Amino acid sequence: MNEVGIDGVEIRTGKLQLDLAETFAPAQGEDPGKYTKGLGLRASSLPDVYEDIVTMGANAAHRLMERKGVDLEDIGRIDVATESAFDKSKPVSTYVAGCLEQVFAGDLHHANKGERKFACVSGTQALDDAFNWIRAGRSRGRKALVIATDTALYERDDPGEATQGAGAVAMLIDEDPDVASFSTLQGYGSADETDFLKPNQQFPSVDGKRSMQVYLARMREALEDLETAGADTHPDNFALIPFHTPFPGMVKKAAVLGYRHCIRGTDIEAEIADEIGRQPRPEAFDDGEAYLDALKEYTDKLAETTQYAEWYERTVAPTLGISEHVGNWYTGSVHIARAAGLKAAAEDARDLTGQQMLVASYGSGAQAEIHAETIQPGWADEISQLSIDEQIQNRYDLSFEEYEQIHDVHNHDAETDLEPLTTPDGEFVFDGWGRMGERKYTYVE
Ligand code: CAA
């Protein structure tokens, strides 16, 4: 059977930005360093008045399909992953299909459409569904369109407000992919957790500090499960390691723990033993707390080693280059991390064909999933087509007052009548409500 994976990718950011250091920090009475250094974020992307999860997803899909020369009849499946859905019955993928049918000839009547929910990990689950559909021989030679799209807003003054973001990632899944093929080995770490949830409400209930602990715990379980499944997780096996990135500071915390786990018993642990000793082993301690203290001390020293710094700079830092400018896109976050890593590698003329990425997804509630992907010969050409740098550059920079109004525009319970801050140009826009409460969309030339 041919390789199956990501044949093309397109990213669409919300067209507004909230500058965290210049605009948000002063209004919150906080030191800008909390956001730029502590969380690792410079700005959040937010949607203009006429943008939402459908327009961002459809605009990403439209550009991707045009660029790859894909017609509607070539698509056999559309799955949208989101945690910002506005309808409990009609899936966002039907709205996206309606948009695409406005601009391409033909229709998508024979494409299977659905919506995936498991917080931020559902984008990766939708990729799995597409992989399984193709590998099961059910695709009839057609491609799957997977869209991860979210408007990640928090209640005003929630600690999560600084990590907000909005955007979509569209991916074409196919045989003989240009970007990356998926391995069949996967590791899962999953448990019934109440770290972040939206029980019939728009904005999440979040236990922020606990959510960070749960992220790390489930990631570790997933890594162990992947190893049990037979994967060799030596840190040098991977050219890039994209993580789910709620904010880059979270990834920094996860990366050093992952590195510590993966070097245990390897040549790397031996090589740095003269400098920082070997990792404490639990069996050498009678007291669990003393073991944890020793482990923390070792981890702090490990983070200061040249070996760790070089590994982090090569495999993880490049994956954060988009997130730091756009914030958390929930379902799309790990997919912008993958794209950012590949984009940075292409800009540095790294030859990654045939090399592996370790992709670490996470969704609150909670589940982590980790798998390897093999980078394909067409990756650099495909990634160099992304327009995300220009999009980020061209965003409208909100004042704090405008930000407050925009937050209200996208708050389902607030009444506002704000004029758009940007002008639509060659894109799908939200165009009001239909008689059954449905949302309506048009393409603006
Ligand atoms: N200069 C440099 N650093 C500073 C600083 C300054 N002036 N002021 C503060 N900092 C540092 C802090 O030390 C802290 O870093 P460490 O964690 O390394 O100590 C960091 O900046 C953040 O400061 P606080 O911990 O005080 O921030 P907070 O409590 O106000 O909010 C948060 C942090 C809890 C993560 C909050 O942003 C939040 O609730 N976010 C939403 C939940 C989330 O993203 N969780 C992540 C895991 S769950 C997940 O991944 C799913 C998902 O997508 C939501």
Image (cartoon, rainbow, N blue to C red):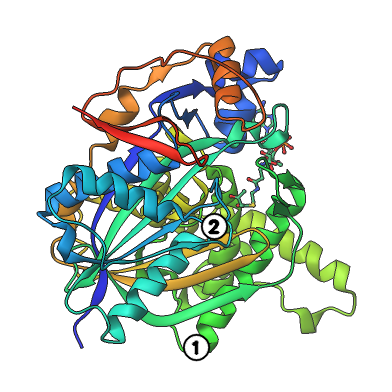
Q: Is residue 278 visible?
A: no
Relative to 237, is 9 above or below?
above
Relative to 391, is 269 above or below?
below
Would you name the residue on which mark 1 appears? Answer: 229
Q: Position of residue 126 (x, y in %)?
A: 42, 66
Residue shown at 23% from the left, 24% from the top: 425
Q: Which mark is residue 79?
A: none
Relative to 413, is 342 above or below?
below
Q: Nearer the viewer, mark 1 or mark 2?
A: 2
Question: Amino acid under label 2?
Answer: Ser
Q: Position of residue 48 (x, y in %)?
A: 43, 24
| Quadrant of the picture in which ligand 1 is shown | top right
Q: Is residue 276 visible?
A: yes
Mark 1 and mark 2 lie on one chain; the one further toward the N terminus is: 2
Kindly state the secondary structure of the residue where label 2 is placed. Answer: loop
Tell me if 106 is positioned left or right of 95 in this view. left
Quarter of the image that includes the C terminus: top left
Question: Amino acid under label 1?
Answer: Ala
Q: Position of residue 74 (x, y in %)?
A: 16, 65
Quarter of the image that includes the N terminus: bottom left
Would you name the residue on which mark 2 appears? Answer: 89
The residue nearer to you, when weighing 7 against 198, is 198
Tell me if 300 is positioned left or right of 16 in this view. right
The residue nearer to you, when weighing 176 against 199, is 199
The residue nearer to you, when weighing 405 against 100, is 100
Farthest residue to the front: give it. Answer: 435
Q: Dot 1, how many residues are within 10 Å of its Cα: few (below 14), some (14-19), or many (20+)?
A: few
Residue shown at 56% from the left, 65% from the top: 258
Q: Position of residue 419 (x, y in %)?
A: 44, 13
How far apart, in angstroms, are the residues tagged by discs 1 and 2? 37 Å
